[in-house]
Image: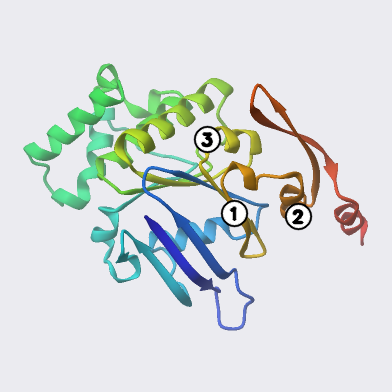
Amino acid sequence: MLEIQNLCFRYSRRSPPVLDGIDLTLPDGEIGILLGKNGSGKTTLFKNILGIRKPESGSIRFDGEDLLKLNRRERARRIAYVPQSIHFGALSVYDTILMGRVSYFGYKAGAEDERAVEAILRDMRLEDYAARNVEELSGGERQKIAVARALAQEPRLLVFDEPTGNLDIANEQLIIDEARRVARDKGIAILTSLHDLNQALDLGDQFFFMKNGRICSSGGPEAVTEDTVRQTYDAEVRIIEYENKKIIMGIGLTQQCTRCSDSP
């Protein structure tokens, strides 16, 4: 379980806080979605979880372990990161996934590392891709390879930054289905940011609405309301139900936001 308590961060002593008392809990096997406008603090929160940035105060624990006290290799064995923009280099799919085992083998892979990669290739139905140059694959296929490489780390937590950005509809669904399978089958907690609210509803178990460096609302699907979306995004939406599924329809900016945008 990921547990974040009263997390605060600022880029310098004189700058305003970017994260201002973040509290977040995400159980194993569930998918948590960070929602909010650009600049709300989502990426900075990821950087704190990943150890790229160090918080000013607060705690980040996973399965009761203090992540802030772990070194880079120890953290890599617990947390895997799949960024939005992925550049692998001219490696085969097999070698790309094997790179996810570096925190275990250092300079030379062993038989156990090779067995782990072969199992991932089999589980994700990537065996026919093993010898192919990863740079020659489609965007959706490369994103799937990125997930496979992350799984090679044998993490307990996966962090995704806009995993479906710039993908077509078919590949968006492919990544969503893969994330859902990984969470359920392997009991891995997944924390991801998404801009598409309907996509978020399709994927998420828990929702965390961020604004001005704070989580202003959180909960299960019932937490996704017209009022919450309005307050988070300064936008009017309508939520309808179709075949027992919520669908969010955009209407436009709120009057308050419109006045702000008209200001000189």
The answer to which quarter of the image holds residue 89 is: top left
Question: Which residue was labeled with disc 3?
Answer: 203
Residue 260: assigned label: none
Q: Amino acid at mark 2?
A: Gln
Going by the image, does 48 lie left or right of 162? left
- Percent position (x, y) of residue 119? 20, 29
Going by the image, does 47 lie left or right of 213? left
On-image quarter of the C terminus: bottom right
Up/down of 67 relative to 250, above or below? below
Callout 3 secondary element: helix
Between disc 1 and disc 2, whose residue precedes?
1
Q: Amino acid at mark 1?
A: Ser
- C-alpha separation, residue under disc 3 versus residue under disc 2: 22 Å
Residue 218: assigned label: 1
Question: Farthest bottom residue?
Answer: 14
Callout 1 secondary element: strand
- Percent position (x, y) of residue 241? 71, 28
- Percent position (x, y) of residue 43? 54, 56
Going by the image, does 111 lie left or right of 136? left
Residue 231: assigned label: 2
Between disc 3 and disc 2, whose residue precedes?
3
Disc 3 residue crowd, few under 14, some 14–19, many 20+, Cα 10 Å = many
